[in-house]
Image: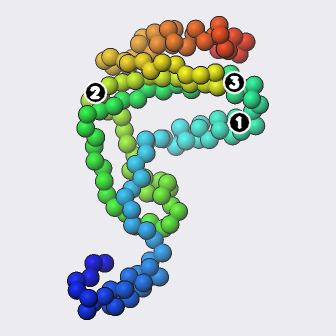
């Protein structure tokens, strides 16, 4: 609460203190996260639970890859919400984001315990044939150097 002049300072302090006691919430912007369906959340949780007890050797056989779109301008989905402290990432307090086509730049990369790939610029739309070509040129060569025994094609 903004208080005009010094004469109201005592009153404003009292109101601010009272509102803190009455409303044990925080006002903040919604957390913006990529959209995940319930099925996808469940699959990720299952994979995480399975890998929780893996050995270092098992983790050495894993490589992570992803592509990201970078745009010239961002969509401002900004709003403020009242929520209880510690509930920032609960579903009701998240504004999901969705990837969309108007991209300036699409980049693909991969990393594992053995190192990382170079970043690959993908021109146009990333379709099945382009993705297979990326895998052939940048992932399959690792079969001969790092993951020969455990590599799955």
State the quadrant of the C terminus: top right
**Mark 2, residue position:** 104
Sequence order check: which comes first, mark 1 or mark 2? Answer: 1
Local crowd at mark 2 within 10 Å, few (<14), some, or many (≥20)? few
Q: Nearer the viewer, residue 116 or 66?
A: 116
Count the numbered circles shown: 3
In percent of the image, x 48 and y 18: which residue is there? 118
**Mark 1, residue position:** 50
Q: Which mark is residue 67?
A: none
Dot 1 lies on which element? helix
In percent of the image, x 59 and y 22: which residue is there? 115
Q: Is residue 11 left or right of residue 59?
A: left
Dot 2 lies on which element? loop
State the quadrant of the N terminus: bottom left
Dot 3 lies on which element? helix
Distance of label 3 from label 1 (alpha carbons): 15 Å
Q: Position of residue 21 (x, y in %)?
A: 47, 82
**Mark 3, residue position:** 60
Foreground label between 1 and 2: 2
**Whether label 3 touches label 2, CB < 8 Å:** no
Sequence order check: which comes first, mark 3 or mark 2? Answer: 3
Q: Position of residue 152 (x, y in %)?
A: 65, 14
| Depicted 102 relative to depicted 137: above or below | below
Instruction: Give the quadrant of residue 17.
Output: bottom left
Foreground label between 3 and 1: 3
Instruction: Give the quadrant of residue 27.
Output: bottom left
Q: Is residue 22 left or right of residue 44?
A: left
């Amino acid at each position: 609460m903004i208080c005009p002049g010094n004469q109201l300072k005592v009153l404003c302090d009292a109101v601010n203190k009272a509102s803190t006691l009455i409303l044990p919430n925080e006002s903040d912007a919604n957390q913006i996260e990529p959209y995940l369906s319930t099925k996808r959340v469940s699959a990720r949780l299952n994979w995480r639970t399975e890998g929780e007890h893996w050995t270092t050797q098992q983790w050495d056989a894993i490589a992570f890859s992803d592509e990201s779109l970078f745009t010239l301008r961002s969509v401002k989905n900004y709003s403020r919400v009242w929520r209880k402290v510690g509930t920032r990432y609960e579903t009701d307090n998240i504004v999901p984001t969705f990837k969309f086509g108007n991209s300036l730049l699409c980049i693909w990369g991969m990393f594992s315990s053995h190192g990382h790939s170079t970043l690959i610029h993908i021109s146009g739309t990333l379709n099945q044939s382009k993705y297979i070509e990326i895998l052939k040129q940048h992932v399959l060569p690792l079969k001969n150097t790092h993951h020969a025994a455990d590599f799955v094609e």
